[in-house]
Amino acid sequence: MVNLELYRIFKIVADEENLTKASEILHISQPAVTKHIKNLENELKVELFKRSKYGMILNENGKKLYLNIKDSIEILSKADLVFNENRDIKLGVHVNMPNKIYNNSILNFYEKNNNTIINIHKLNAKNMFSALEKQEIDLAFSKKYSEELYDINKIKFISIGNLHDVFVVNSNSKYLNQNLTKEDLKNITIYTLKKFSSAYQNLVEVLGYKHNDKINITNIDFSGIMELLKCRDIIAVVTKEYIEDQLETNELHLLDLGISLPPAEYGIYYNVNNKFKELNDLIEILKDICEL
């Protein structure tokens, strides 16, 4: 009979499609994960994954097994949590959020909770909310996003403080010495985050775009904006707290246009069905320490 733990490891590898990520979740080494998967394949006498440089992808045998054990493993995992005295915490953090904002909170938590580990998962907005709804993470620390992205009956937001969206250019930009008006900005392509972000929504409002106007804004992810700023003379709207290092080294410059964008809330998202003592403790610490 196959050890149930092998099935649990198999499911995590299948979900992550990556041995390194699976080993981080399981708190065991990557070679150990590989060995457990091989042991399961030997027990079942079939291969379960297509192994390549791109990761671990389920083959047809793996897909069949996954469909048969997925729900059972999730049920057993939830049952185990009910009777487990000390629970580790899976903390989802938005991929752009600087860790210095929440590091002190985690250190403070560890001082008061000796037996709990916080596993940090860097996520983008869409997979963050999906993971919260499926209870794959316990908590998410992020900017506030449009409620269109998640089920408001399942997920709630606790506001902690504000971040600040700003206009930025690179150090060689021709725009640094220009007195640009709102109308000028409408004739220049502005680069900012996706349409569901506060940066985009606030920019549209501040520049006074009407419902039927052609909006001269290009939506791109944060990493893409940062790369463009290195090689092109563009104006971007990003969160100031995300680029403080680049501002200090003069790699980037704030563009003083006499225009203030509204602050962007940030805080904690949690699934209303997922509350336990350690999680409540972490929420309270984040609320107390993280306000900027």
Image (cartoon, rainbow, N blue to C red):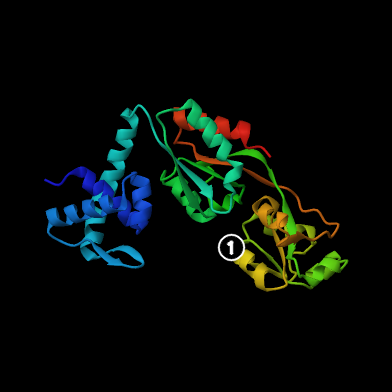
Residue farthest front in this picture: 249
Residue drawn at x 36%, y 67% is: 54
Q: Secondary structure at mark 1?
A: helix
Q: Is 227 drawn above or below residue 136 in the view shown? A: below
Name the residue nearer the viewer: 27 or 262.
Answer: 27
Residue drawn at x 35%, y 58% is: 18
Name the residue nearer the viewer: 275 or 40.
Answer: 40
Figure quadrant of the C terminus? top right
Residue drawn at x 54%, y 31% is: 108
Amino acid type indicated by mark 1: Ser
Q: Quadrant of residue 38?
A: bottom left
Q: x and y percent of residue 246 in the render? A: 68, 57
Residue drawn at x 77%, y 72% is: 188
Figure disc tally: 1
Q: x and y percent of residue 190 in the render? A: 72, 67
Q: Is 59 drawn above or below residue 28 in the view shown? A: below
Residue farthest right in this picture: 179
Q: Is residue 172 visible?
A: yes
Q: Quadrant of residue 215?
A: bottom right
Q: Is residue 280 visible?
A: no
Residue underneath mark 1? 223
Q: Is residue 84 left or right of residue 165?
A: left
Q: x and y percent of residue 135 in the render? A: 42, 43
Figure quadrant of the N terminus? top left
Task: Estimate how packed mark 1 is, as few (under 14), some (14 to 19) or many (20 or more) residues with alpha carbons within 10 Å.
Answer: few
